[in-house]
């Protein structure tokens, strides 16, 4: 979103408590599939039939390296004039009497004059919303992502084994 705003001429400051793409994005599968599960009935049926399909192969779908993608987009936005403040957290958001956004206070003690805040704080988004008394429901669910190193990558496409079962 930041990259697209910069391209349209907006003045953008990226504020990140960490480094770009190192939040949930760094631990996602990043399988580019989310929007079309209900667009085609055959694909929807395949998802529903998951338990009967040992391995599903999706030749038309892709995988992206989330952290590299985010880093590159932020880099391009900065090259086009955006400002990037990493390692700096948003601590407070100031509003005017009419409720409009006016300022953002940062963990380094500085304060920015702004008129729009895009809340992209991942699992902390509900905390950011709470700074202006908004309720953003988030549910924390623990999960495990495994990364395997191997000399040669044998699989070059997204695959899914929905019928995984514990052999014991
Ligand atoms: C296991 C797993 C698998 C997934 N698989 C897929 C998939 O296959 N396809 C798909 O499309 N999606 C997938 N997702 C979902 C996807 O990864 C997330 O929706 C996406 O990465 C969220 O990005 P984000 O930028 O909103 O959050 P994040 O990547 O978490 O970024 C939030 C950023 O906000 C910063 N931040 C937090 N608090 C503050 C603060 N107070 N001030 C300043 N900065 C702050 C953090 O430092 C962080 O950099 C998956 C998620 C998981 C967990």
Image (spheres, rainbow, N blue to C red):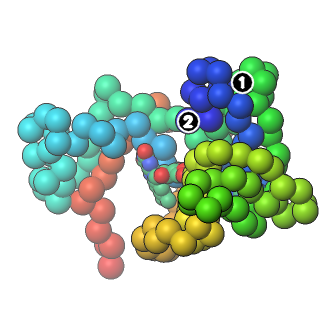
Q: Is residue 133 left or right of residue 68?
A: left
> Closest to the observer: 101 or 65?
101
Task: Tell me the CA gap for discs 1 and 2.
Answer: 12 Å
The label nearer to you, 1 versus 2, is 2
Q: Is residue 130 left or right of residue 68?
A: left
Kindly indicate whether the residue at mark 2 contacts the one at mark 1 (C-beta within 8 angstroms).
no
Q: Residue at x 27, y 56 (%)?
A: 162
Q: Residue at x 26, y 47 (%)?
A: 55
> Closest to the observer: 87 or 150?
87
Residue 123 x/y as whole percent: 55, 65
Q: Which mark is residue 1?
A: 2
Secondary structure of the residue carrying numbered label 2:
loop
In the displayed structure, 135 sits above or below 158; it is below
Whether residue 27 is visible: no
> Closest to the observer: 132 or 124?
132
Q: Which mark is residue 120?
A: none
Q: Which mark is residue 76?
A: 1
């Amino acid at each position: 979103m930041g990259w697209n705003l910069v391209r349209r001429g907006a003045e953008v400051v990226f504020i990140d408590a960490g480094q770009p793409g190192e939040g949930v994005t760094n631990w996602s599968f990043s399988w580019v599939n989310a929007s079309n599960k209900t667009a085609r009935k055959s694909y929807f049926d395949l998802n529903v039939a998951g338990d009967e399909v040992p391995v599903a192969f999706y030749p038309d779908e892709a995988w992206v390296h989330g952290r590299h993608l985010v880093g590159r987009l932020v880099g391009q936005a900065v090259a086009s004039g955006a400002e990037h403040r990493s390692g700096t957290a948003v601590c407070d958001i100031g509003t005017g009497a009419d409720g409009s956004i006016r300022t953002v206070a940062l963990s380094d003690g500085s304060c920015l004059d702004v008129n729009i805040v895009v809340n992209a704080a991942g699992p902390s988004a509900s905390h950011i919303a709470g700074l202006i008394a908004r309720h953003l429901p988030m549910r924390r669910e623990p999960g495990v992502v495994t990364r395997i190193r191997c000399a040669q990558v044998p699989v070059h496409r997204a695959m899914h084994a929905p019928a995984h079962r514990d052999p014991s």
